[in-house]
Amino acid sequence: MNVDLIFRIAGIGIIVSVLHTVIKQAGKEEYAWLATLAGIVIVLSMVIQVINQFFETVKTMFRLY
């Protein structure tokens, strides 16, 4: 596993949490939840790509087609 991916996920988490707090303090709680949801979708797409690469490697290693 690449350490860079962990740092990117942590960075996105920090940015999203700060953004959520700032937007919530401005009184726009619905937009704060949308920002959080967008962050979750971005991180989930990154994780799904890594899982896809893992399964492709397993298929290649065991010659599963």
Image: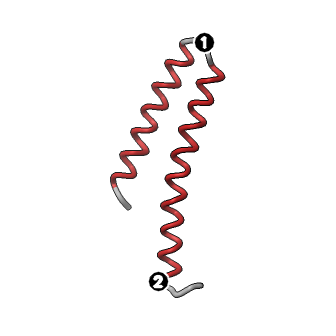
- Judged from this view, the residue extending furthest toward the right is 30
Compare marks 2 and 1 and give the one earlier in the sequence: 1
What residue is disc 1 on?
27
Q: Position of residue 54 (x, y in %)?
A: 49, 69
Question: Residue at left 59%, top 84%?
Answer: 65
What residue is disc 2 on?
61
Element class at badge 1:
loop
Q: Is residue 46 above or below residue 55?
A: above
- Judged from this view, the residue extending furthest toward the bottom is 63
Under mark 2, the amino acid is Met
- Judged from this view, the residue extending furthest toward the top is 26
Question: Residue at left 51%, top 74%?
Answer: 56
Q: Are marks 2 and 1 in contact (CB under 8 Å)?
A: no
Q: Is residue 59 above or below residue 8?
A: below
Question: Residue at left 51%, top 46%?
Answer: 43
Q: Position of residue 32 (x, y in %)?
A: 59, 24
Q: Quadrant of the N terminus?
A: bottom left
Question: Residue at left 56%, top 17%?
Answer: 24
Q: Position of residue 9 (x, y in %)?
A: 43, 45
Q: CA distance from mark 2 to mark 1?
A: 53 Å
Element class at badge 2:
helix
Q: Is residue 9 above or below residue 34?
A: below
Q: Position of residue 53 (x, y in %)?
A: 49, 67
Under mark 1, the amino acid is Gly
Q: Any mark on residue 12, and which?
A: none
- Judged from this view, the residue extending furthest toward the left is 3
The count of marks equals 2
User: Does residue 17 appear left or right of residue 34 in this picture?
Assistant: left
